[in-house]
Image: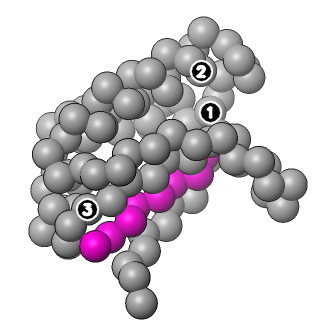
Amino acid sequence: MIRHTVIFTLKHAHGSLQEKAFLRDARIALEGIPGVGKFEQLRQVSRKNDYRFGFSMEFADQKAYDAYDKHPKHVNFVQDRWNREVERFLEIDYEPL
């Protein structure tokens, strides 16, 4: 199992329609990709960093993760939305010990 996580801050104003649209469209685009499990959108609450949101999802194995990474819905979302609307991010992938 691989847990794929990313924390990020959007360029949009907090609570704006653009922010809400990005989160809605991300869920629609990413959650339905084959192999994606336990998709979550999260609000980052720690005072130890200033990122605003997080996405978390699980994949059965590296093959499923690689298929997601190359899937046209993921590629298009990254090119059309992520690269334009995300100010900064940190991606972390985990495997159980």
Choose mark 2 or mark 3, whichever is in front: 3
Choose mark 1 or mark 3, whichever is in front: 3
Q: Which residue is mark 3?
A: 59
Label 3 neighbour load within 10 Å: few <14, some 14-19, many 20+? many
Q: Main secondary structure of the magenta part?
A: strand
**x and y percent of residue 23 in the render?**
49, 27
> In the rendered view of the protein, which quadrant contains the N terminus?
bottom left
Furthest residue toward right: 47
Under mark 2, the amino acid is: Glu
Within the image, what quadrant is residue 34 found in?
Answer: top left
**x and y percent of residue 29 in the render?**
29, 30
Under mark 1, the amino acid is: Leu
Q: Nearer the viewer, residue 17 or 88?
A: 17
Taking 9 as reference, is 24 above or below it? above
Labelled pair 1, 2 in contact (Cβ < 8 Å): yes
Under mark 3, the amino acid is: Phe
Give the residue at x 39% y 22%: 25
